[in-house]
Image (cartoon, grey):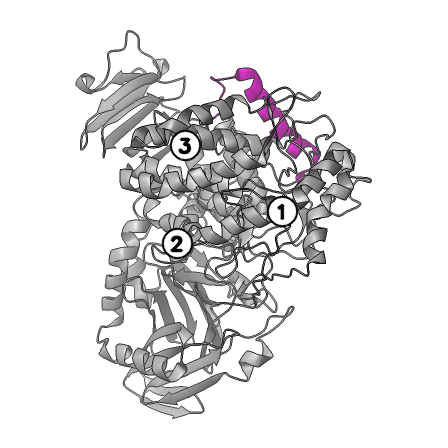
Amino acid sequence: MTVDHNLFGANAAQVPQRHKLVLKKPASWWGSPWREALPTGNGLLGAAVYGAVGQETVLLHHARLWTGGKKGELPDVSDSLAGIRQLLEEKNYREANGYLAGRLEAHGYESLRETPLPLADLKLIRTASAGFKHYRRALNMESGEVTVEWREGDAQFARALFVSRQDDCLVCELRAEGRAIDVQLQLTPHEKGASGPGFPPAMDATAEAQAAAGYIRYAAQNDDDCDFGAVLRAIPQGGEMEHRQGIISVCGAESVLIVLRVFTHGERIREWERLEAELARMAWSYDELLARHRALHSPLFLGADIRLHGEEGMPASNEEMLLEAYEGELPSGMAETLWAYGRYLFISGTHEEGLPFGLYGLWCGDYKAVWSHYMANENVQMMYWHAAVGGLTSLVPALLQYYEERMEQFRDNARKLYNCRGIFIPAGTTPGNAAPFQIVPVILHWTGAAGWLARHFYEYYQFTGDMDFLRKRALPFMREATVFYEDFLVLGPDGKYISYPSVSPENTPQNFIAEEGRFGQMAHAMPTAVNALLDFAILKELLTQLIEGSLAAGEDVADIAKWREMLTRIPVYEINADGAVKEWLHPDFTDRYRHRHISHIYPVFPAHEVTKASDPGLFRAFAGAVTQRLVTGIGDQTAWSFAHLANIYARLGDGDQALECLALLARSCLLPNYYTLHNDWRGMGISLSYGRAPVQMDANLGWVSAVQELLLYVTPDHVKVLPAVPKAWKKGVAEGLRFCSGSIAFSWDLELGWLEAELKADRPTDLLLTVPPALQWLTTEESAIAAAADRTNERRIRLGAGERLKLYASSETSGQ
């Protein structure tokens, strides 16, 4: 037997190794096997396949199924701002820290976050006739199929499963050679893990399953008094089918096709009848359903590709790849595969008409999953950094719409917490609760979420050129974020803004840590400060883009002078005695390097404000702050902070250090199915020590962005090819990556000293194209390029819509 899965081999035979995950073990995390399952999904419905031979479990999840929240009525405590500021001015920082939270508690305010609710488990139960051997479970990322295959004696068994993007259903087929298929099919509440709460008792009392005429009906009631559930249809070829107590039993079949649809809010009888009628009309085979799904899924996944020539000698399984990574350097094949996997998770975990991608994707198997809300003090943003350059802009609107739909609550937050116009977006929100539910200073006093999210609105406009979107959606959101700052910021005696209370997520100044480690690595001892650099970095980018966008749209021209004046009132960034940029621009707060968050590097990444060319000294100071984070505390990092550091090092031009951050991530926080965890669970000393190791896929998607940043730097008027390519990536190919007005494909071999590139413009394009200094542009279509006096590594490119341009660069030593 080969890992190409003989019984479904036609679907996987041509898939390159970098587009597959292959495991030789079933999901094995004791008590919570969902953590090591293989995921598939259509952006709305997710399925996580454990891969067990005797009792297979497929965890079902839907983006819109949440439970357990409580939306409290936010009291008007806007008069608290004056009290907080007076305490800060009097240097009573610790008292100021708890002032607003105390006022809310005194008013009896309580608001609880919702959590994702697992919909059900699909169980496939069989009795083995002999011990299994030649076991494989695999994920084909090009098709979204999960396959499980094994042998028993002389017989071979296989299952394949995917969630259709076309037909919004789960499709599974069981096949065998050398023996008939005997199987029981069940739909049950998702089984409780080893720790944490199980299926809520009130829901358990409402759960029921019925089986008849080849169908299983399943439902339970959520705490909103609405039913949720599923209908399964079983279609065996040959054999017999029986029904009892909500179970379908199939005996002696050649194959069994299973098709399943779900509902999340409704009345069970009505929804069962609707779904059963829909399934009855579906007359397609497994392969026909797969083809319909692939027509939508594959173009998204294959729209971009990166090859680092890591497949040669690439281990055949994830387990072997991880063992190789533990030896030291990150295998190029692993870097490729994890880049592809992050894209696959994103495509499978969000939808144009769904919700934003979440920290657990669509595969959460805990009933009260920690940090399962949308967290916008870095995590949400990290999961979207890759999308535009990676050609997945079409999936970004789910993020934008999510925040637009909650604007009235965000305005209410701004009024009642800070007596400000505009919007205050709490770092944490859920679909049913956009008011603050984390009543702690580190969240209540951080005002930057709206401004940080505004860059995603503007980036969508930059990459689509959609002027209607700019006028009707991006600029209105950006204005609401700006007007909050107009009311919130205070002018100091020097004419510069003061931002207070101010938080640098989620750090505490060093001089307010009484004893090193006293509050624990995850605690927020005293985050409330004055003039966090991040506040001003976000504001500077927001104002700059608001002015630029307003000029392009011909709107709000009268306000541009005011916004330009605001830019002049932003204080300059400062450098401390260590040569590092200061995290707080106030003398009362000293830098604390031992922390996982590093968002004050915002002007370098994700923004483009500070570059080596624009301000070399300040650029070095930002680099110094990054270095201090790793030098002083590698044990304080997390998977997502390593991913963030990799992106930053790419912007700093240090590709080898960026790659080392990815290698550290792989050795510390990666499960065999390549889910990333918040932190290591084994005490290996690389990441912080925390009592739990939650799944957090922000690092999966941060990995995608980091690989792209190493290979391509993009602004509207400047594109750098191989801006920070690591020495280990001597040659490779990138296709389908995007710049703001078009796409680019390029290949390189730095040992031989050459690079080829082809640009395609979707809209009129005028930009500077740069390659590494060791290369020089040689041959181009000069009619499309401004004349260059000398051979250099930079060329000005001008293209009309629809035009293509091929370029070639070489080193002087290449002889070409």
- Amino acid at the residue labelled 3: Leu
Looking at the rendered structure, the secondary structure element under dot 2 is strand
Indicate whether residue 625 is drawn in magenta.
yes
Residue 528 marker: none
Q: Which residue is under mark 3?
A: 546
**Is 87 placed above or below 674 here?**
above
- Amino acid at the residue labelled 1: Ser
Say which label, 2 or 3, has the lower sequence index: 2
Provide the residue span drawn in magenta. 608-635
Viewer-nearest of labels 2 and 3?
Answer: 3
Cα separation, mark 3 vs mark 1, equals 27 Å
Q: In the image, residue 578 lies at what x, y percent?
A: 69, 22
Viewer-nearest of labels 3 and 1?
Answer: 1
Q: Is residue 748 left or right of residue 649?
A: left
Residue plotted at (39% across, 87% down): 248
Q: Main secondary structure of the magenta part?
A: helix
- Amino acid at the residue labelled 2: Lys
Q: Is residue 522 left or right of residue 37?
A: right
The answer to whether any part of residue 323 appears in the image is no
Say which label, 2 or 1, has the lower sequence index: 2
Q: Which residue is under mark 1?
A: 78
* Front residue of 330 and 507: 507
